[in-house]
Image (spheres, rainbow, N blue to C red):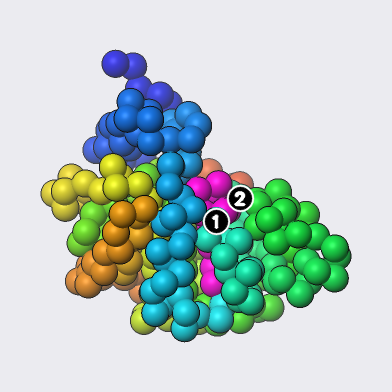
Amino acid sequence: MMLNITPWSDRNHKKEQLRQRIWQTLKDEGAAQRDPFGHIPSFVGAETAAQRLAGLEIWQAAQVVKCNPDSPQQPVRFRALADGKVLYMAVPQLTQLDCFVEVTAAALEARQVSLAEGSTMAGALRHGRPVRFEQMQKIDLVLVGCVAVTTAGGRTGKGAGFADLELAMLGEFGLVQRETPIATTVHDLQLVADTELEMQAHDWPLNWIVTPEQEVDTQTVLPRPKGLDWATVQPDQLEQIPILAQLRNSFH
């Protein structure tokens, strides 16, 4: 079978093979709402997984939530707004210096924008308030998009490394702490054996995995990165992510 190539294919060949397998499985099993290849899969049951997540103590205790912009986490973003939380969403591919937007139910109401619209990627970008790290509140819960996960806390996204970069930068500014829980919502078919997904030093592990069928407390012992690992930053990332280049200049 010819691999479906993404802009970030083969940065890690073993992980790319795993992603291709998961995408194909989701497609074959009818578990994806649209073509999953090259994307954080928009899985069947995403709304149910968001409801399960909302039942967890980590959700109920969180006042400030950071969530990825991908479509399978739209129900999570909607629930965050409906529950009165401050929502931060990264600008896709971090293309702006103001690389996050802040969205709240009150701000949307003032603009006469529905929570449903404000929780979409396009709606959050259109109606949210662009912010830099210095303008953000400390984050209580992080949601990341994943293609494959393990019950030990291993994870991989599309292969571009944006989630890990975001978390490393948020950590540099003290917005994500060592104890800040990191969670994801996925389909059960996205869970793989621990041995199939090797985590690297710059990868941020998961504390919770929520599917339409279950909640998994990984109780991970995998280490978190201590900050930005400049040795792993790719030249194209420095070229295409303005805030990353700015941080390198300020830190060096």
Q: Residue at x 35, y 47 (%)?
A: 187
Residue 250 spot, x, y in % from top left: 59, 72
Callout 1: 10 Å neighbours few (<14), some, many (20+)?
many
Q: Where, quadrant-wise, is the N terminus in this rendering?
A: top left
Task: Give the left or right position of residue 220, taking residue 128 as reference.
Answer: left
Residue type, label 2: Pro
Is residue 152 shown to the viewer in this render?
yes
Query: Any mark on residue 249, and which?
Result: none
Asked whether 149 or 113 is in front, the reply is 113
Q: Which residue does the image show at 54% across and 72% down from the upper left?
A: 65
Foreground: 68 or 173?
68
Residue positioned most to the top: 1
The boundaries of the magenta stretch are 65-74
Residue 75's tag is 1
Outermost residue toward the left in this view: 195
Instruction: Specify whether residue 67 is painted magenta.
Output: yes
Would residue 144 be visible to someone looking at this image?
Answer: no
120 in relation to 104, above or below: above
Q: Which structural element holds mark 2?
A: helix
Q: Quadrant of residue 30?
A: top left
Q: Position of residue 104 (x, y in %)?
A: 70, 71
Q: Identify which residue is drawn at 57% across, 65% down.
A: 79
What is the secondary structure assignment of the residue under circle 1? helix
Q: Position of residue 200 (x, y in %)?
A: 27, 56
Relative to 2, is 114 on the left or the right? Answer: right
Answer whether labels 2 and 1 touch (C-beta < 8 Å): no
Residue 177 shown in magenta? no
Label whose residue precedes the other's in the sequence (2 or 1): 1
Say if 155 sits above or below 13 in the image.
Answer: below
Question: Where does label 2 land, which residue?
Answer: 92
